[in-house]
Image (cartoon, coloured by chain):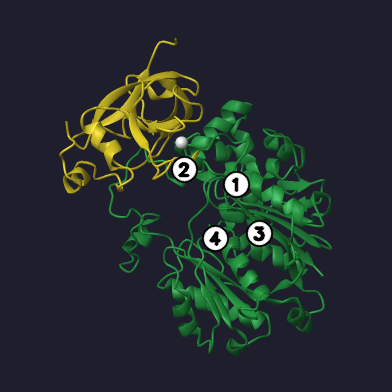
Amino acid sequence: MNEQLDDTALSQRFPWVRLDHDTKNLFRAWLDRRFVITRCDDCRRYHHPPKPVCPACWSSALTLTPVSGRGTAHLVMLLHQGAPAPGVDYGKGPHPVVTVELEEQEHLRFTSTVVDCPPEDVRIGMPLELVWIDRYGAPFPAFRPRENG
Amino acid sequence: MRNPIKDQVAIVGVGSTGFSRDAGERSPKSLACEASIRAIRDAGLTAKDINGVVSTQEPMAPQPHRLSAALGIPDVTHFSSPTPVAMFSLIDAMNAIFSGACDTVLVSFAFQRLPWNSRSAARDPFRKFDITGGVVPMPESMDPSAAYTAWASRYIHEHGVPREALGRVALNMRANALRNPLATMKTPLTMKDYLRARIIRDPLCLLDMDVPVDGADSFVLTTVEKAKEITDHPVVIHATSVGLVDQNDEDQLPSLAHHGQHVVVDALRKKSDVWLEDVDVFFPYDGFTIITLGWIENFGWCETGQAGCFLEEHWDDASGRVLIDGRIPLNPHGGSLSEGATRGSGHVREAVVQLRHQAGDRQVEGAQTALIGCGGFFFNSQGAILRRL
Ligand SMILES: [Zn+2]
């Protein structure tokens, strides 16, 4: 468990995130490869990205809750150029960026990339599942195609 | 919906440097001063007539107190630096005048290409601006420019729209820019050129994105009473609105069926005495081509998903651009895509010039009413109706 990792050390593991006290524990969970989404203890609604209160009922009782990582591609773009990252080579082909609608709740979405699939085959509506990849030495939740059902 | 400010504030001065990809060794403050002096002189006023200064928070633009100091504006009783896009600053100035915080306001917009926009901008040792806040950029970040591309993919998916629908937006702006001496882009554009342009983020290409520029626009606003002392036919702000929905994180927007533009249109329609049938010239924002299609549909010119067909139906082959009902142009100055990325100030300036009947060979005959849809879907949707009295 990385619960003990202090905030300064956590920031160093995620140089690409503007972390704050509302979002830090979501990323802390990634270090243990736990894919979690903020859920309200009172009204049971999920929201993302993490906010200080539940936007639906204003409760502060929020829990980072493991989700299945299963969902459907809602938005799809292929970057022909963009920010550099380890393992991303625009010279070899476009890099897919996909917003996935998670199966836990309508309109609950998470944006990442898709692996194990040629970029041009990534399509809106495609069923996807979570797969952890490495980004700057830290686990990063990505997606890969899954059999429907 | 209440609109007590209707027709009470006028835009009496406009000034522009014109736009280019390289204004040379000029500071943004220098560009802002040039446009502001032109705007104040255009209104027939002097520095001592100004007592409000609004300077838009563009990355390199001067703060309002620095602009006041540079222009020697004696005593200022209202100053602010609203965020882009354009209407936030104009609405702030309008409200300040109407409330009595000040009487006559200078509104400034100054733009300079950022170091990563071009090689010559990167060579300028004084253009230092850190937009990242110290974090390493990531390919998967859903920043606003990526988000318009992502939602364009959804729009194309839901409505089966060909790329030509977006291309017509780019072609219209370019054809218009060719008749605007202030515009950056000076070469004609064909659909073939558009379809061959470099893909940046599929499904959008280089020509779907506005063109970063150096330059500035300024405006002078005052009470309608004072405006009538200056001119017989002042251009007044008839109605404005801004719009935001709750789930506005770029990738969490529930759908394209309800976002900032819808809130803007609903409020503007309720506040205004005039609507589409009265419009003489239409200014849909075009920071990305997909935003323009959104404004056309959401104002109600056509059904959802039909903006591409609408542009085709209203295409004027002779001039290679859109003329709604053979009459109403879209962004006759060339918009952000081809005049330059002024984040809406160009749209407002051209609206004023058209309503003054000073647009030369771009002039819409007898223009009385201009409709502006400024900004995009998420956090900067705005609308305005300007009228000639
Ligand atoms: Zn709740």
Q: Which residue position holds label 3?
A: B333
Q: Which residue position holds label 4?
A: B342
What is the spatial separation of the Cα atoms under label 1 and label 3, in whole angstroms? 25 Å
What is the spatial separation of the Cα atoms under label 2 and label 3, in whole angstroms? 47 Å
The tint chain B carries is green
Element carrying mark 4:
loop
Q: Quadrant of residue A63?
A: top left
Q: Are marks 1 and 4 on the same chain?
A: yes
Where's residue A1, x and y in %? 16, 30
The disc label shown at residue B260, or none: 1
Element carrying mark 1:
helix
Q: Are marks 2 and 3 on the same chain?
A: no
Q: Are marks 4 and 3 on the same chain?
A: yes
Q: Are marks 1 and 2 on the same chain?
A: no
Q: Residues within 10 Å of mark 1 (few under 14, many from 20)?
A: many
Q: Nearer the viewer, mark 1 or mark 3?
A: 1
Residue type pointed to by label 2: Trp
Q: Which residue position holds label 2?
A: A58
Look at the picture and state if B130 lies above or below B38: above
Viewed as shown, does residue B28 lie left or right of B362? left
Tally the numbered discs: 4
The tint chain A carries is yellow
CB of residue at label 2: within 8 Å of ligand 1? yes
